[in-house]
Image: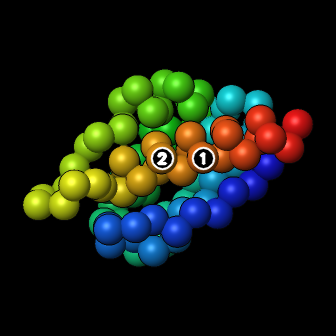
Amino acid sequence: MKYEFSPKGVCSTKLEFELDGDTVSNIRFQGGCNGNLKALSILADGMSVDQLTDKLLGITCGFKNTSCSDQFAQALLAAREQEKHTA
């Protein structure tokens, strides 16, 4: 299932990804640090929600209390929760 998320407190303005069961794919960020987010998207493709949230939750950016990576992890948890309620 495809998900869209609006990150908060970071430079990226939109995040899209797909979940097939617990596997994440087709990750796209809009805005933010282009090269870093392209790399994150490629590296994260095919990983599980648990693998990604274990690594990405709590990462900060500069003086912010969150980051695009942290927002991605939070979006994955929200999507997984949403899938539980629609199943």
Disc 2 is placed on an element classified as: helix
Relative height, residue 53 to residue 29 (above, below): above
87, above or below 62, in the image? above
Q: Position of residue 81 (x, y in %)?
A: 67, 40
How far across and how far down the image is residue 22, in percent?
A: 68, 29
Q: Residue at x 49, y 25 (%)?
A: 51
**Residue, disc 1:** 78
Number of residues whose C-alpha sits closer than 10 Å to that of mark 1, classed few (under 14), some (14–19) or many (20 or more): some
Residue at the extreme left of the image, as rendered: 63
In this rendering, would 4 be left or right of 42?
right
Q: Identity of the amino acid at label 1?
A: Ala
Viewer-closest of 33 and 56: 56
Q: Are marks 2 and 1 in contact (CB under 8 Å)?
A: yes
Q: Is residue 70 visible?
A: yes
Check disc 1 and report its element: helix, strand or loop: helix
Instruction: Say which residue label 2 marks.
Output: 74
